Image: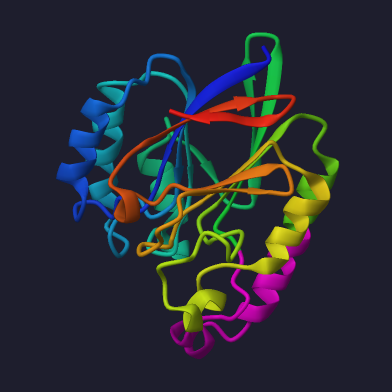
Amino acid sequence: MQKFVIAATADIHSPKYLTDFIKALDRTPLSDCVAFIIAGDVVYKGNVGAASHVFSAIRRRYKGPLIVVFGNEDYEDLEDRFRKLYPEVIWLSDEYHDLKTNDQVIRIIGTRGVLDRPTRWQAKNIPDIEKRYSDRLMKLEDMLKRSPHPTILVSHYSVTYRTLSGEDRRIWPELGSRKVEVLISRYKPILAIHAHAHRSKVFSIDFNGVPIYNVSFAAFKRIFRIEVSLKRGILSFI
């Protein structure tokens, strides 16, 4: 298998954008996708039950692997509830999943991500937040470095500032991290996906040969079909 297609989205914030999300599902061919990936913020402000509407809508149209990372509104202290209520979902929190497709294994590394500067709320309410981000960055590097397979990095927070145009530049450090950008440049995953930037006007860039996508549904009101080549990274956005 030299190329494959994934579906990717994020920032559905169910029930906030649920109606538009279902309409977008109806417009998006999914039968050839090897995975459906959600890069965080499935629900609005920790509403665990609202995820059921998202997942049932997807499952009516797609039966393949459903891989989800947690976003900042899929609250960290609710992770166990999400996993328990939706066991059919492959949840990733600084973890990886090896996706087997025909004769190829693709490693999906999933994380909430890293911020260069904690938000004011985080700094006030999470005393060790900077250490958490530092530890997470080291863990991401270890997973990227040790991956024996072609790898896709999925982060809720942005993995670069280059897809943040449209957002207030003063808060870019609170939306993502250039430190993750360094890891992408060093370890060359075949694709990197993020979300969280609701006002972004840039949905994709090529960064030193690595395609990076902002798949925020809040920003672009669409589900992305991304065709990826194992040899050359992205082939096309469909």
The foreground one among 164 and 101 is 164
The correct choice, above or below, for 155 with respect to 75 in the image is: above
Q: Is residue 135 magenta?
A: yes
Task: Decide whether the magenta segment is chiefly helix, strand or loop.
Answer: helix
The correct choice, above or below, for 10 with respect to 160 in the image is: above
The foreground one among 84 and 41 is 41
Residue 172 is situated, as x and y percent measured from the top left of the image, at 52, 75
Q: Residue furthest top?
A: 102
Residue 218 is situated, as x and y percent measured from the top left of the image, at 30, 55
The quarter of the picture where the N terminus appears is top right
Residue 147 is situated, as x and y percent measured from the top left of the image, at 80, 37
User: Does residue 168 appear to the left or right of 12 in the view shown?
Assistant: right
Q: Which residue is depicted at the point 18% across and 43% down? A: 20
User: Does residue 221 appear to the left or right of 229 in the view shown?
Assistant: left
User: Does residue 136 appear to the left or right of 23 in the view shown?
Assistant: right
Q: Which residue is depicted at the point 44% across and 14% down? A: 32
The foreground one among 40 and 88 is 40
Q: Residue furthest left?
A: 19
Q: Residue furthest bottom?
A: 124
Q: Quadrant of residue 179?
A: bottom right
How many numbered badges does the structure rendering display? 0
Q: Is residue 93 magenta?
A: no
Q: Quadrant of residue 160?
A: bottom right
Q: Which residues are magenta?
A: 114-138
Q: Which residue is depicted at the point 47% across and 87% down? A: 120
User: Does residue 123 appear to the left or right of 166 in the view shown?
Assistant: right
The quarter of the picture where the C terminus appears is top left
Q: Which residue is depicted at the point 58% across and 66% down? A: 161
Residue 57 is situated, as x and y percent measured from the top left of the image, at 24, 31
